[in-house]
Image (spheres, rainbow, N blue to C red):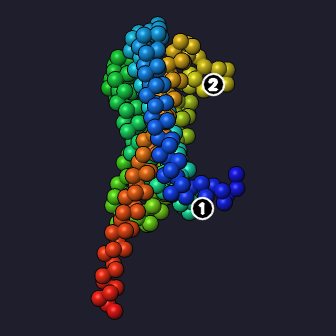
Amino acid sequence: MSATSIFEFANPVRFERIAARAFPLALIAALVSAAIGLYFALFNSPADYQQGETVRIMYVHVPAAWMALFCYSAMAVSSAAGFIWKHPLADVAAKESAPIGAAFTFLALFTGSLWGKPMWGAWWAWDARLTSVLILFFLYLGYMALWRAVPDKTRAAKLAAILAIVGFVNIPIIKFSVDWWNSLHQPASILRADGPSVHPAMLTPLFLLIGAYSFAYIALLLSAMRNELIARRLARYELASGEAPARVVER
């Protein structure tokens, strides 16, 4: 696909038409995969031999943690596309990914605390993985605050893009923190060169719920981007209608 066709595809009007069709499909896929995944997680997967029934928190926690990293990565890539190539929808995608990613990150931190209490005996530990994910949450909040703090939205988009791109260095730190430092978290158990170490009966609901979270992200992002484009269009109309009388008076 050429750069020209990519920018044609990113035309806001064309995007809104595609998003209107894709949104209900993504929402249905999220609900169906979540329902099936939760059924398998609660009724068709075994308890862990060490963690017992507590392991079921994994089915909420792990997908949330994965999506926290994915949303920020998508935000950083979109920010780079907007900052470097002036992609017409890039800053919209980045801006609307932030609150979704922040929600996933908060859910990962919250469920991680619930999981950590019976496993580690504490709600929180300044573990390398936990600390870097907390920093990720603050990066999301800082990104959203920057958009709100700068009145000039063109300048806000540039400053927010720089923050998102620079903050991306935290993503590999989160990923490899369990390998680089003495961490309470266990090493990777799914994405391994020798294959997953998780029982297949646990992998099925886990992948179903990762799919549910992913489809939910797509549905929420499409809806939020459409709303943002409509809001920007209305703002331009209001600005144009407000300036017209002033120009007439000046004449």
The residue at the point 40 percent across, 63 percent down is 233
Seen at 43% across and 51% down, the residue is 226
Question: Between residues 208 and 138, which one lies in front from this camera angle?
Answer: 208
Residue 62: tell me if it is visible: no
Taking the spot 47% from the left edge, 11% from the top edge, the residue there is 45
Residue designated by label 2? 192
Q: Compared with residue 84, is residue 111 higher up or lower down, i.e. above or below?
A: above
Residue 228 horizontal/vertical position (percent)? 40, 55
| Front of the two marks 1 and 2 | 1
Neighbor class of circle 1 (other Cα within 10 Å; few <14, some 14-19, many 20+) is few
The reply to whether residue 34 is visible in this rendering is: yes
Point out the tag, 1 or 2, that comes first from the N-terminus.
Answer: 1
Q: Position of residue 116 (x, y in %)?
A: 37, 22
Q: Dot 1: what SS?
A: helix
Residue at mark 1: 85
Is residue 235 or residue 202 the one in the foreground? 235
